Amino acid sequence: MRCDDRTVAPDTPLSTPAPAAGPADSPRPADAENPVAPYDALLLFSFGGPNGPDDVMPFLRNVTAGKGIPDERLAEVAEHYHHFGGASPINAQNLALQKALQDELARRGLDLPVLWGNRNWEPYTRDALAAAHADGARRIVALVTSAYASYSGCRQYRENLWASLDELGGDLGLAEGTHPLAADKVRPYFNHPGFVQANVDAVAEAYAGLAADAAAQARLVFVTHSIPDTMEEASAVSGAAYSAQHLDVAATVAAAVSERLGRDVAWDLAYCSRSGPPSQPWLEPDVNDHLRALAEQGVTSVVLSPIGFISDHMEVAFDLDTEALETAAELGLTAVRADSVGTREPFVRGLVDLVLERAALARALDAGTADASTAEGAAVGDLPPWRDVCRPGCCRQRAGVASGIPAACSTDPWS
Ligand SMILES: CC1=C(CCC(=O)O)c2cc3nc(cc4[nH]c(cc5[nH]c(cc1n2)c(C)c5CCC(=O)O)c(CCC(=O)O)c4C)C(CCC(=O)O)=C3C
Ligand SMILES: [Fe+2]
């Protein structure tokens, strides 16, 4: 519950818990006057990346603080960035997405400023929140540039949001632990129709770009970021595991593509961008190993679909377009990479739909009129829509082990 002055005490949940399951027969309440109420701003909330060679090491130190990534791996990753002049494409891509969201909101006549803030580089989350606060915003909704639920794609952002709100409260001279803004978050949207549709379109286009004989038998290989097995286990505490979320999206996309092509497309899920010590198990197979296995099985062409990423940032530009496509060439495989969703229209439209869905839920929770149907958002595939408000223990780094680091947008920030 928020106070009248809209400050949030540290031990108070930022949002009311989502309602328990029940009959789904009444629609979300409509607010024809302002569908984005109660939000004053939308935070496009991303990872961040270096803008030039001098940024690379400080950026990598920000990313890996306290993570135990070996120096050897850091030096290797720094080389990936230097290979591209020391700049990550991610910042330009986020600016393009910010613009696309602004345009889509304007097209619908919705008045909601879109701010951009990052966990690991400028513009930092705290600075974006400070600007919003200075402009008079007191309640915001965050849209994370990661579609899947796991520590890396959900809780880590929520921890950063909480810490940034704490710091901003300190900057503004508020009592310790008092937040100057209330913040909600759009649910992980991996199975939202807009994200899935944009991936279907991209994969179908990639098949259309292949020569007929290659297209006729190309294996569809979906790729996502690997995570440690321990993080995978923890991701399953509050719903389908990270890998299961991807398998659900992959099955939906492959079925739609098969329908468009008029034949059953065989597909697999592979992983990229592993880090951490070799002794620590991470999700496998690595995409390069998988391409080798496919070549051994007699497969001669592949379409790589980066469903784990929403734009062509460094993981895609280096780990797929540079490394994996090189592996494919060495193996004599014909390989193309499908686009990530980027600023494709169905995706951007879907994101704005998700913001409106979250706003309607916030109004219903505030008014005490939320029921099971209020929390029922659009989803495709076998899995239900992810929860709008994270539950205690959601997306920890390790199952059952509380970090003691508070996180925003949860019923229990301290779990
Ligand atoms: C699931 C996931 C996503 C997808 C969801 C999402 O999109 O958010 C993602 C995205 C990204 N990861 C990125 C960069 C990095 N990730 C690292 C390290 C790690 N990522 C992990 C997971 C993920 N990461 C994990 C478990 C680690 C180990 C350490 C830790 O637990 O944090 C490291 C350290 C060096 C290394 O070990 O590689 C870097 C530099 C960039 C920016 C790219 C650019 O600059 O264009 C982006 C978008
Ligand atoms: Fe990463």
Image: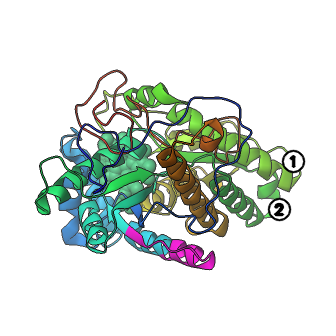
Q: Is mark 2 within 8 Å of ligand 1?
A: no
Image colouring: rainbow
Instruction: Give the amino acid at mark 2.
Output: Ala
Task: Kindly check if marks 1 and 2 are in contact, taking CB atoms under 8 A apart as contact.
Answer: no
Q: Does dot 1 land on a helix, a strand or a loop?
A: loop
Instruction: Write the residue at 24% across / 53% down.
Output: 179
Mark pair 1, 2: CA separation: 13 Å
When the figure is inspected, residue 302 is found, relative to residue 19, above or below; the finding is: below
Asked if residue 258 lies left or right of residue 162, the reply is right
In x, y percent, where is residue 78? 26, 58
The residues colored magenta run 99-115
Q: Nearer the viewer, mark 1 or mark 2?
A: 1
Q: Neighbour class for label 2 at 10 Å: few (<14), some, many (≥20)?
A: few
Asked if residue 308 lies left or right of residue 58, the reply is right
In x, y percent, where is residue 203? 69, 58
> Is residue 374 something that shows in the picture?
yes
287 and 405: which one is in front? 405
Q: Which residue is identified by label 2? A: 212
Q: Quadrant of residue 347?
A: bottom right
In magenta stretch: residue 107: yes
